[in-house]
Amino acid sequence: MRHGRQDRQLAFRFWAKTAEHHVHLLCVRRLNSEESSRPLARILTVLSVRLRVDAGLLLIILVSMAIGKPFTLQYARERVPEERWKSPRFARINFVITSVWALAFACIVAADLMMIYLPNVPIRVGIVVTLAALYGAYRFTDWYPKQASPT
């Protein structure tokens, strides 16, 4: 794979930024809960924006599958020789990978809803669910094509 090192560096930066964002969110939520309820409204706004963004991404993924053009196709075409693009195996692999990303974003939306509407559940539970869903989908995206490809 010619982009291996660049992909790992990009993935590392993505995960570091995501973790930084969630740690920041956890700290802000803790500070806000110790102070008045007014600053807490600001964190709920951040969470409701996250919910809308994550739900929007889930919708994009589902629509891409419904119209028969899974969103992973454009990324896969950057890594796979053009002669494979029209094969049924290539399409099937991308459909499965896109399905896993849909499942991941469904988990993330559920975590967002939990963080907003279930204040008794520690926010770190939602953060762990979000990170686990993203990491799982990322790892599956790397693993599955190797398993589904002929040897």
Image (cartoon, grey):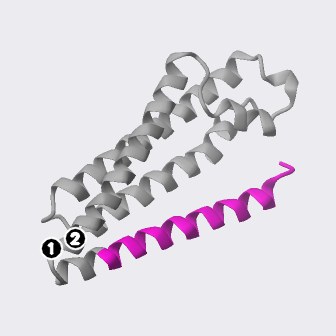
Q: In this view, does 123 lie above or below 1?
A: below
Q: Where is residue 120 in the image (x, y as percent from the top left)?
A: 12, 65
> Mark 2 sits on what residue?
40
In magenta stretch: residue 24: yes
Q: In this view, does 122 lie above or below 62?
A: below
Q: Which mark is residue 37?
A: 1
Find numbered disc 2 in the image and state the secondary structure of the residue it sits on: helix
In magenta stretch: residue 9: yes
- For the stretch drawn in magenta, the main secondary structure is helix
Q: Which mark is residue 139?
A: none
Amino acid identity at mark 2: Leu
Disc 1 + disc 2, Cβ < 8 Å: yes
Q: Where is residue 43 in the image (x, y as percent from the top left)?
A: 29, 66
Amino acid identity at mark 1: Ser
Q: Which residue is drawn at 61% across and 39% down?
A: 144
78 with respect to 140 (left or right): right
Find numbered disc 1 in the image and state the secondary structure of the residue it sits on: helix
Q: Which residue is drawn at 24% across and 78% down?
A: 32
Q: Where is residue 109 in the image (x, y as percent from the top left)?
A: 34, 46
Quarter of the rendering containing residue 8: bottom right
69 with respect to 45 (left or right): right
92 with respect to 39 (left or right): right
Depth check, front residue: 45 or 122: 45
Q: Residue furthest front?
A: 38
| Magenta residues (range) | 1-28
**Count of all numbered marks drawn on residues in the image:** 2
Q: Badge 2: how crowded within 10 Å, few (<14), some, or many (20+)?
A: some
Q: In which quarter of the image is the C terminus?
A: top right
Q: Badge 1: how crowded within 10 Å, few (<14), some, or many (20+)?
A: few
Q: Position of residue 53 (x, y in %)?
A: 43, 46
